[in-house]
Image: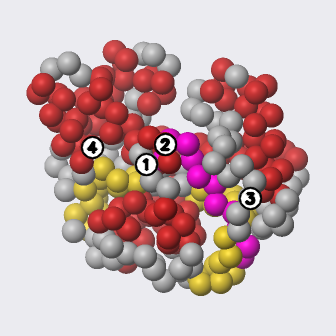
Amino acid sequence: MKVSLFITCLGDCFYPDVGKDTVHVLERFGCEVDFPLAQTCCGQVAYNSGYHKEAKEAAKHMIHTFAHADYVVAPSGSCAAMFHEYEQLFQEEEWKEKARVLAVKTYELTQFLVEVLQVKEVGAELNAKAVYHQSCHMARLLKVKDAPLTLLRQVKGLEVVPFADADVCCGFGGTFAVKMAPIAEQMVEEKVQHMVDTDAAIVIGSDSGCLLNIGGWINRQGKPMQVVHIAQVLNSR
């Protein structure tokens, strides 16, 4: 099965190893992975800020960049969801159809493993107590909630524990953390406190933006928790 990796901006700039872990996991299950070098930002920041003309240009570029792909897989529910939003940007039926084609073949990593490859156990092992942070865009826009936990429950040695208000936003929200910094700070403080209360050693997430926000607060407060992307967990052996 041929898969094109959509690394995303945050993955490329801040979590390049997550891209490697994603490739390793996909190859473990027989996928042939390529990396289109022309890929850029998906346009989500412009789209969420109301700059739809600029987002439209980014969308056209990404539609062209991944036109050859059988499947597109991203280690991000948020950016994968943006590909599913592209159709809303266009009035021309030609581009709406191209956007629909891209959306149908685009998946977040855990979604692809569970729904397409029908994998529920990846052979990973990690001896730790952890909490899983569910990102808003992945759960509410992409509608992916169960796939990450389905895979994490099968990781040998890993205990994933619940925490209070797990479905509440961490305060990142794309440009929200920039425009509404005081509110975002209070939200992440509350989120992290609920996580710390579980005595978990690890925070696992599927979106780099959330991990940057949560990890940044944990580091500034000196909390004894490690923040990791789910691809890193699934590739741990």
How far apart in space, not on screen, are marks 4 and 3 (Cα)?
A: 33 Å
Q: Position of residue 113 (x, y in %)?
A: 37, 67
Secondary structure under tag 1 reads loop
The residue identified by callout 2 is 140
The residue identified by callout 3 is 163
Q: Name the image quarter holding the C terminus.
A: bottom right
Within-10-Å neighbours for mark 1: few <14, some 14–19, many 20+: few
Q: Position of residue 148 (x, y in %)?
A: 51, 63
Which stretch appears magenta? 128-138
Report the disc number at residue 143: 1
Marks 1 and 3, the one that precedes in the sequence = 1
Q: Are marks 1 and 4 in contact (CB under 8 Å)?
A: no
The answer to whether residue 132 of the structure is visible from this angle is: yes
In percent of the image, x 59 and y 27: which residue is there?
175
Q: Which amino acid lies under the numbered mark 1 shown in the image of this protein?
A: Lys
Within-10-Å neighbours for mark 4: few <14, some 14–19, many 20+: many
The residue identified by callout 4 is 103
Could you tell whether 219 is left or right of 209 in the image? right
Secondary structure under tag 4 reads helix
How many discs mark residues in the rendered view? 4
Marks 4 and 3, the one that precedes in the sequence = 4
Q: Nearer the viewer, mark 4 or mark 3?
A: 3
In percent of the image, x 59 and y 84: which residue is there?
156
How far apart in space, not on screen, are marks 1 and 4 (Cα)?
A: 13 Å
Within-10-Å neighbours for mark 3: few <14, some 14–19, many 20+: some
How far apart in space, not on screen, are marks 4 and 2 (Cα)?
A: 16 Å
In percent of the image, x 26 and y 68: which residue is there?
32
Q: Name the image quarter holding the N terminus.
A: bottom left
Q: Quadrant of residue 63?
A: top left
Q: Position of residue 3 (x, y in %)?
A: 27, 60
Q: Which amino acid lies under the numbered mark 2 shown in the image of this protein?
A: Arg
Marks 4 and 2, the one that precedes in the sequence = 4
